[in-house]
Amino acid sequence: MTLPLYGTASQSAGFSSDKARSVLRLRSVDSAAERHVADFALARTPADIRRAIEADWPSILVVSDGSTDLPGQFTGQLVAVSPKYDYLADGDVIGFDHVSRKFRTLYRRNSAHNSFLVTERCNNYCLMCSQPPKDVDDRWILSEIKESLPLVDPATRGLTFTGGETLSDWEDFIAVLKECRDWLPETAIQVLTNGRAFADSRIVDAWKEIGHPNLMAAIPVYSAVDHVHDHVVQAKGAFDETILGILKLKDRGQRVEIRVVLHALTAPIIEDTGRWLARNVPFVDHVALMGLENTGFAIANDAMLWMDPVDYGDGLARAVDYLSAAGINVSVYNLPKCVLPKSVWPHALQSISDWKNGFVEECDGCDEKNACSGFFTTGRPRFSRGIRAITS
Amino acid sequence: MARFLSPETFRTATEDLSLLPFNFERTGANQYLVANMVGDFIRLTEDELSRLVDLRVRPGDGLYEKAYAAHLVSGANQKAQRQLLAARLRSRMSFLQQSTPLHIFVVTLRCEHSCPYCQVSRQSTDRSRFDMSEETAMRALDIAFASPTSRIKIEFQGGEPLLNFPLIRKIVAAAKQRSGKKLDFVIASNLALLDDAVLEFCKENNVLLSTSLDGPADLHNKNRPRPGANSHELAVAGIRRAREVLGPDWVGALMTTTEASLDRVDEIIDEYLQLGLDGIFLRPLSPFGFAIKTKQFAKYDAQKWLAFYERGLRRVLEINRQGTPFREFYATLLLTRMLSDRPIGYVDLRSPAGAGLGALVYNYDGSVFASDEGRMLAETGDDAFRLGHVERDSYNSLILSDKLIGAISSSLTQCAPECSTCVYESHCGADPVYHHATQGDALGIKPLSAFCARQKGIMGLLLDILENSPEDAAILRRWAAA
Ligand code: SF4
Ligand code: SF4
């Protein structure tokens, strides 16, 4: 199942033209929570709409397939979207463009996988990038995130910031993280970054200044050898800056996760990479070894990148051994149990975001389905020849 | 559609490469063992080594990748590898931040044993001559508390320290009254005098017991004569009783190797195993004091000892393979250095040396030594490591004494001949007291040194197992794991 997170509203009314975009939070019609100016009553039926008006809601979002008629006395704001989006629920936050009526779901309160895209710009150009970089002025996204943060439930367990390179406008982005510290101190904040910016001491110092109690920089390292990494990320000198960045972060006591995406350029050497990480940076807080999501550039480079996980399972198992022996907390993401050696199972997590996670027919008869990552439903999924229901 | 660049685009030109520091040693007709600045090992063929040294390498040729991952070569303009090496070296050497964590109090020289290899003990009942006075003990405590480290271990030795148990009580109570440092206590005793009062005291004050156990009864009793010839029986009974009352982690045993031990290593190990101990420290015979005088030391050389050690290590590995976790502690220390960057300040495995910086010894008469062996040398008339006296000296005057600075600075492996280019240097140590005792010189000529021969022998053996015996290698890696 893939949830549609983007779309165009079928109707809208009451939005002023001196502002291009708004951030809206949905509330159930009967919600007793204190109302924020950004709150919209979430109505699914004509009866809901009536109750919302009776309850004096100044703003209403309707999920319905017909056109919505509102009583003449209603002068507030209205957005109507098709039933495709009926997953929307109390506490969710969406960004809405007044003129084009385009919207994006920014935050779903019931999901464990909320992430904010910070920018599409990047100084790497990874061969398997799932979010191919675009050189556009998208600084409005940061303002939208700033507007959203006060609307996010402070009980949210985790939030991820992703890109592009999240530190492209590092000063503005660090300001956003400071807002996270103030609004969401209980939430684990994870920032996906290529880490190169941290080679600049000013930026690591600013990062340290944020002082969020649970902030982690998740940084990819693809090889122990400079040019192999640089080729994967298509940027000469990236390896040197990334490793330097990791060292500077740890030197200042900041939390760091290392991510290795596994494909035909990185998976055959994963044992070497794992041994190197274990020996050289055992002080990182987490290492994630990740199956490839076949979308974005990964589809274009399929011939160069596809490798069946069953063909690198043994090396992966040895990498996991080296890393755990060095006392590093290590996880394997995005790879189904049946393609992994058993010794790796305890490290294999259900890591795929709920909105793009699925299983295949074979999985119906499998004992491990409840503990299995399953598959990405995005892009053009490729399936291992090792998929086999596990039965005792 | 996007344009992607080829792998070649990202390769540094050969003229922009530069070598990082490394040491190497020929280990076979066409084979070299190579260690980078922090002691990670790789093997290279002769051809590979000369191509590397001449920088006839090129990214993509396989050798470059091997050498780059091992921090032997870098891009001249790159910083990350150099910073990584610096960070790792800093971690490895960070034991230096804890100056003088160990303080040994020789509370009496008297002993009821008469071991032939023992350097220092006296059979005497004359308390006034051979016991430490309370005044001396309190001055020694002042010095111990003046050391910069936040945690100190106070170890009671002898002679047989339990012969002056009242003073041990006083020192522990006085130390606990002073604030500002975390404290550990150890009593090194033959346990012949262990009784309920001692056990209760240990339990109350978290005192660890460390005893001697040389192996099976006949061997142990031959090494350790006492009236009644029951040293072994008393030690074993003491270990059992102490484990019962204090818990298994609160009593340890150390063995002394003599010539009679050399072909009995399996039996010695089994003795430890049967007692439920979690490992054994296979120690060389020390060349000090009476051991030199009685020519015990000369009776076997490093090669004989290495054969003993290898046999012992293989027996220990076999025990592990059969399912019982059991360690050899010297290998554990070396492996921790070889496979991780955790700081190991163990006295024989550090440079700058552990003399004084790692431990100070307060003799019964108030004189202060840089190491326990230094005290034993003094018994044979050699005062090279006698740093001063508790009455006249402070922590600073002892640590900054010319004797100590001379011994430590002249023995640094980082710049010593032979050591500075040795492939094992990162994991080895300076032992100025040993080399002074055997060669009359704190630095020593390493090709003539049994210490050096042992270090090279053990590390070579451990590497061989790590590389060639996967099952045993997994056991060794577990020992080194955090
Ligand atoms: S059969 Fe399906 S559910 Fe079972 S392990 Fe494989 S992918 Fe997972
Ligand atoms: S003592 Fe021997 S083994 Fe140790 S560093 Fe010196 S030369 Fe190498």
Image (cartoon, helix red, strand yellow):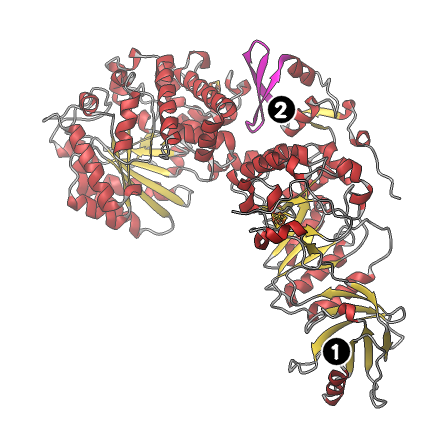
Please state the extent of the stretch shown in magenta in the rendering: B21-46
Above/below status of A115 relative to A297: below
Residue B134 in view in this figure? no
User: Residue A44, labelled with which disc?
Assistant: 1
Q: Is B15 left, or right, of A335 in this rendering?
A: right
Q: Nearer the viewer, residue B404 or B464?
A: B464
Quick check: is B23 in the magenta stretch? yes
Where residue A22 appears, as percent x and y from the top left, is 81, 71
Quick check: is A371 in the magenta stretch? no
Q: Is B81 left, or right, of B7 in this rendering?
A: left
Secondary structure mostly seen in magenta is strand
Would you name the residue on which mark 2 appears? B21
Where residue A255 appears, as percent x and y from the top left, is 60, 50
Q: Residue at x 35, y 24 (%)?
A: B315
Helix, strand or loop at disc 1? loop
Where residue B418 appears, as percent x and y from the top left, is 51, 16
Where residue A287 appears, as percent x and y from the top left, is 60, 44
Quarter of the image where the N terminus of chain B is located = top right
Q: Nearer the viewer, residue A87 or B55?
A: A87
Q: Quadrant of residue B156?
A: top left
What amino acid does circle 2 point to?
Answer: Pro
Mark 2 → mark 1, Cα distance in angstroms:
71 Å
Task: Count the marks.
Answer: 2
